Amino acid sequence: MPDIDVDFADNRRDKVIEYVKAKYGEESVCQIVTFGTLSSRAVLKDVGRVLGIPLSTIDSITKQIPVILGRVTPLQEAIDSIPELRWVKESNDPKIKQLIEYSLVLEGTNRNVGTHAAGVVIAPAIITDYVPLYKTPSTEVITQYEYKSLEEIGLLKMDFLGLRTLTVLEDTLRLIKENHGREIDLNEIPYDDPRVYELFAAGQTVAVFQFESSKMQEYLKKLKPTSIDDVIAMNALYRPGPMDMIDDFIDRKIGKKPIEYLHPNMEKILRPTYGVMVYQEQVMQIANEIAGFTLAQADMMRRAMGKKDKVLMAEQKKQFVEGAATIFDLIDKFASYGFNKSHSAAYSILAYQTAYLKTYYAAEFLAATLTSEIGDINKMTLLLDECRKQGITVLGPDVNESIATFSVVDGKLRFGLSAIRNVGVGAAEEISRSREEGGRFQTIFDFVSRVDLKAVNKRALESLIQAGAFDSIGHKRAQLHASFERIVQFGQSVQESRASSQSSLFDVLEGEQKEIATYPALVEAEEWSQGEKLNREKELLGVYISGHPLLKYEQEFNSFTSIRLGDASTVVEGSSARAAGIVVDVRRKIDRKGNTMAFVQLEDFTGKGELIFFSDA
């Protein structure tokens, strides 16, 4: 049976499943079980705990087992290939021997049950005629068979993937229409735009789908893509198996290395990728051309690669022409995570579209991307730093101007209320609703008398105050903070009175008269220092909005630094530069030789940079 994967905007995936159930019958459609298995790290911890081995000993092993692009290295592979784990293999300690023996047996066994992130099965009749079902603790009904078993019994499995990028594209296009009056059809944009490739070549791909990582940005600066084919190839290569070929691909593309082929018949297949095996389709063509495989046999090899099926790959090797052993070894290495071109092309088209929007409508694109990341303070911080690098002014949250999500006003990005820590979507939407119904808020007392204080609770209100969301009304943050209980009690009193249908002076009076006659006085308090304001902003928003702690030292900075951190990418490799900033994060790591190293993140007015300290520093 075919295995069909379809991406949908992540905020519409549930609607797709509802549609499929309505179309084919609820009794014929079901989501699929998935079994969490014990990785090498997890099994060592579980077995070690049972054997009573100290956690420090277990950690000394598990911390040396690398995770490569989300894949935890298997235990046998780790102890065979990592020098720092040789002692484990050679240990005479009976406990360590037991640990490894039991862990190798238990590694890969099922540990827990979950629901497949995307898989949905559609049966030709009532699904219980084909497969038993399981009810999860959350009362969700899923199949008891995982996807391989479902394929074997002939059921159609589809992956309905919720892709956040599609939501970001939709939101960006909506913002462009609102702010510029233009309707952009992404199917009609040019795919040979030099400015877009300049963005890729400069490695300015923060928020660009599939090209966000710092390592990918380094490769892009070396490759300097000039066509969508380069982008597709780079996307396919940046995976655990083919990744080793990236430098070779780049060197051949830029003329640093000659383009060579292991066999003359491979030239016409690998010419578009400079002689480097990049796609599964190329493997199929090589098997057909070199080994005489039929296309059906070649597709079997592709499936073996796609499923990472070692047994099936071994069977394929027997069928491969013995004289092509070197070529097969290359294929075998590629097989671990080889990507098909159609998949890479589809995702690279999305990558190009996001890069296009970032190039021409950066404020709208980054606003939509920030909205998609609300709740993840680290990603929001990264994106807000990118706004600063792009020269986009970020305006703080404002109860009279902000909506729940990030928005764009006159080319400036306005902070969304729901992005303030402790506020949330419900409170933000209630503020917008109240403002639409009753107009702008005149004072904080007007605010607490109108919004539902169950939706905008005390914690949310306190965060709004500290984040500066009431600054435009004319209130000082310290004064509002000192008057907090008085403000809340006033709002509760007004709303209780209104709920009990008791008219009050508040209900009768309007405008300035209402404010003067009914609002209590705020507590006198000295305004917070600029440093205190900024610290609270950073805690609640992830960034400094109203200033920066280093601004008062700007003259001193200019006297001894040669570059700002935001411009660090312009420093020529091998040259030196002087920069300074605030230490915002320190991460310690043990290298493979057991030495301690540290990654220190600095921040100045313009951006961030990372310093690496080795053990002899």
Image (spheres, rainbow, N blue to C red):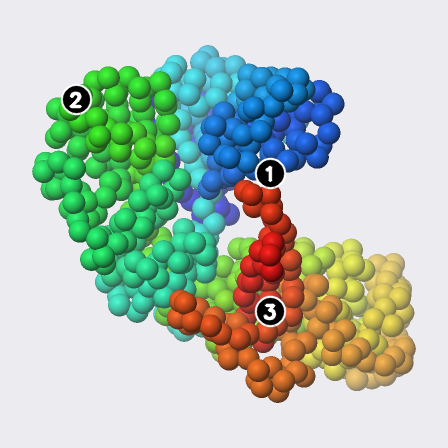
Q: Which is in the foreground here, disc 1 or disc 3?
A: 1
Q: Mark 3 points at which residue?
A: 603
Q: Classify 151 as above or below 167.
A: above
Q: Residue at x 19, y 45 (%)?
A: 275
Please tell me whether mark 2 sits on a helix, a strand or a loop: loop
Whole-Å distance between the Cαs marked 2 and 1?
A: 42 Å
Task: Using a 10 Å C-alpha cutoff, classify the residue at mark 3 as few (fewer than 14 neighbours), some (14 to 19) or many (20 or more).
Answer: many
Q: What residue type is labelled 1?
A: Lys
Q: Earlier in the sequence, mark 1 or mark 3?
A: 1
Among the 4 quarters of the image, the one containing residue 351: bottom left
Picture quadrant of residue 296: top left
Q: Please provide percent x and percent y for residue 516.
A: 85, 83
Q: Are marks 1 and 3 in contact (CB under 8 Å)?
A: no
Amino acid of disc 3: Glu
Residue underneath mark 2: 321
- Report helix, strand or loop for mark 3: strand
Reading the chain from its start, which is encountered first: label 2 or label 3? 2
Picture residue at 13% right of the left edge, 29% below the top: 290
At mark 1, the secondary structure is: loop
Image location (x, y in percent) of residue 365? 45, 64
Quadrant of the frame with the C terminus: bottom right
Kindly identify the amino acid type of the residue bearing the numbered disc 2.
Val
Residue name at image x 73 percent, y 29 percent: 54
Q: Point out residue 458 in the picture as x, y percentages from the top left corner.
A: 81, 60
Task: Find residue 133 and report its image quarter.
Answer: top right
The residue tagged 1 is: 63
